[in-house]
């Protein structure tokens, strides 16, 4: 009898607790992003600290967590560095204790945990302190922004300022990692608010990231989450995102490439990674040569001009018509896990204006023996919505939204009065 009473009391507490949470439970979260023109990196202002401040972060799809420069004016009354061997440290998967000989400040405490941080642009890495602080983000019903919601103790890492060397967008204070780890931005936010462990990335001059499930509605009122094709998502041990590209077609014809480069071998080489910090798709040398040659043949009617680095194939743009989906050039298909699952790239994602009058094939030679044979870069991702389902390990992709007469800039960020 006593135990069942205890049970009901417990149930009551759980219920009222979850009810209190329910009343503020958002359907999904939304974060505006923009492209920085000089660096071609994508930036989001994330609201953090007490008093709250918008802090500019570079979006790093494969980054393991959020990290920020703490050497420079980190003022917050809610900063807290968890003790070594605490629950937070094991969630962050760090068991290395720190000491710091200078005066205590954010990033410098004794008996806290160390994380190794990586700047994906310079590839420099260094140690930082695991920390927690307030993070705020806008909620959404999928069609427009709703109330701002807050995570009181968001886990991130505090970096020394030398790691923020660039070239980076002006004012950058850190990197926002979207990788699949316990403390990656999507996982932490989805767990805190009880959302589906999914997020969607839509890059453009102005773009958007959604955390949680669809709808993802773009003006004039199209729910992109209903238009997605799916392919398995392969997540590396570091939480990085790969997909299985099995062949490449140009104008519906197979480009001859060494297919063993397209699978990830036991030493972790090969395969196709998706990245937001590579401005253009990187291709292993032999794939680059084959694709470039094939594309040149298919577009032989257009006068070529000298290639402009880092590209290998450029054309006189006065002889290329423009279409709704960009320059009128042959399509390129990335054939995925099945022959009938194809990610089709059109002119806007294939070509880039390298100079007045000059359009170049927006692919770059990655040299021989790069880690991944293909790194699908940001130019190829723009105005495509990608949904990462971290529970079922699936990638949903829309192909070019320009075909649907919308774009990644078309989320209505004007909130209701
Ligand atoms: C850490 O401990 C050392 C040795 O006790 C001390 O000198 C140092 O000031 C401490 N650092 C901080 C940030 O408290
Ligand atoms: C294909 O690539 C693999 C992995 O790099 C290499 O071992 C093999 O020799 C290549 N095959 C051909 C025909 O070039
Ligand atoms: C492109 O073609 C136009 C017309 O034929 C010509 O005037 C122009 O100089 C060419 N541009 C380049 C970069 O070759
Ligand atoms: C390229 O465009 C120019 C200007 O429109 C035209 O005079 C020329 O014939 C075109 N060349 C080709 C090869 O189509
Ligand atoms: C965007 O949403 C706001 C608030 O719901 C609405 O007033 C406005 O008309 C919308 N804008 C467009 C272009 O639909």
Image (tube, helix red, strand yellow):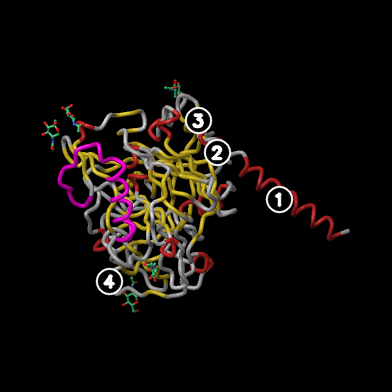
Report, in whole angstroms, how far the alpha carbon at label 2 lies from the one at label 1.
31 Å
Q: Is residue 109 above or below residue 187?
A: below
Residue in view at x 46 percent, y 24 percent: 220
The residue where tag 1 is placed is 13
Q: Is mark 4 within 8 Å of ligand 1?
A: yes
Which numbered disc covers residue 143? 3
Q: Secondary structure at mark 3?
A: loop
In this picture, residue 11 sits left or right of residue 184 = right
Q: Which residues are magenta?
A: 283-312
Q: Secondary structure at mark 2?
A: loop
Does the magenta portion include 301? yes
Which mark sits nearer the N-terminus, 4 or 2? 4
Q: Is mark 1 within 8 Å of ligand 5?
A: no
Report, in whole angstroms, how far the alpha carbon at label 4 lies from the one at label 2.
47 Å
Report, in whole angstroms, how far the alpha carbon at label 3 lies from the one at label 2.
10 Å
The residue where tag 4 is placed is 102
Q: Which of the pair 159/38 is nearer the observer?
A: 38
Q: Secondary structure at mark 4?
A: loop
Q: Is mark 3 within 8 Å of ligand 5?
A: yes
Q: Is residue 133 above or below residue 203?
A: below
């Amino acid at each position: 009898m006593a135990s069942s009473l205890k049970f009901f009391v417990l149930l009551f507490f759980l219920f009222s607790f979850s009810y209190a949470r329910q009343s503020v439970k958002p359907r999904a979260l939304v974060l505006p992003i923009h492209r920085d023109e000089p660096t071609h990196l994508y930036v989001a202002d994330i609201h953090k600290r007490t008093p709250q401040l918008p802090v500019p972060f570079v979006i790093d799809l494969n980054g393991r967590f959020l990290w920020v420069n703490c050497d420079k004016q980190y003022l917050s009354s809610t900063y807290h560095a968890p003790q070594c061997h605490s629950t937070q440290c094991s969630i962050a998967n760090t068991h290395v204790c720190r000491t710091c000989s200078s005066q205590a400040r954010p990033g410098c405490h004794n008996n806290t945990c160390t994380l190794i941080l990586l700047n994906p642009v310079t590839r420099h890495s260094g140690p930082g302190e695991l920390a927690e602080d307030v993070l705020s983000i806008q909620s959404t019903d999928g069609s427009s922004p709703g109330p701002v919601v807050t995570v009181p103790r968001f886990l991130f890492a505090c970096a020394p300022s030398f790691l923020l060397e660039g070239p980076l967008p002006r004012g950058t204070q850190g990197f926002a990692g979207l990788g699949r780890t316990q403390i990656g931005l999507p996982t932490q936010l989805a767990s805190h608010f009880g959302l589906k462990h999914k997020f969607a990335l839509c890059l453009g001059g102005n773009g958007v990231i959604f955390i949680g499930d669809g709808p993802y509605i773009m003006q004039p009122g199209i729910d992109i989450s209903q238009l997605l094709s799916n392919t398995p998502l392969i997540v590396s041990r570091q939480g990085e995102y790969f997909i299985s590209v099995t062949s490449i077609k140009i104008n519906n014809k197979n480009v001859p490439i060494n297919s063993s480069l397209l699978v990830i071998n036991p030493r972790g080489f090969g395969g196709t990674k998706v990245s937001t910090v590579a401005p253009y798709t990187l291709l292993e040398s032999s794939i680059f040569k084959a694709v470039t040659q094939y594309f040149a043949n298919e577009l032989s009617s257009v006068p070529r001009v000298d290639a402009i680095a880092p590209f290998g194939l450029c054309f006189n743009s006065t002889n290329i018509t423009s279409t709704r989906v960009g320059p009128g050039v042959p399509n390129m298909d990335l054939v995925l896990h099945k022959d009938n699952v194809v990610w089709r790239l059109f002119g806007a994602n294939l070509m880039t204006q390298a100079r007045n009058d000059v359009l170049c094939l927006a692919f770059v030679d990655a040299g021989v023996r790069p880690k991944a044979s293909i790194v699908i870069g940001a130019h190829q991702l723009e105005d495509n919505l990608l949904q990462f389902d971290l529970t079922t390990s699936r990638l949903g992709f829309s192909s070019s939204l320009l075909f649907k007469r919308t774009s990644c800039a078309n989320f209505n960020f004007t909130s209701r009065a």
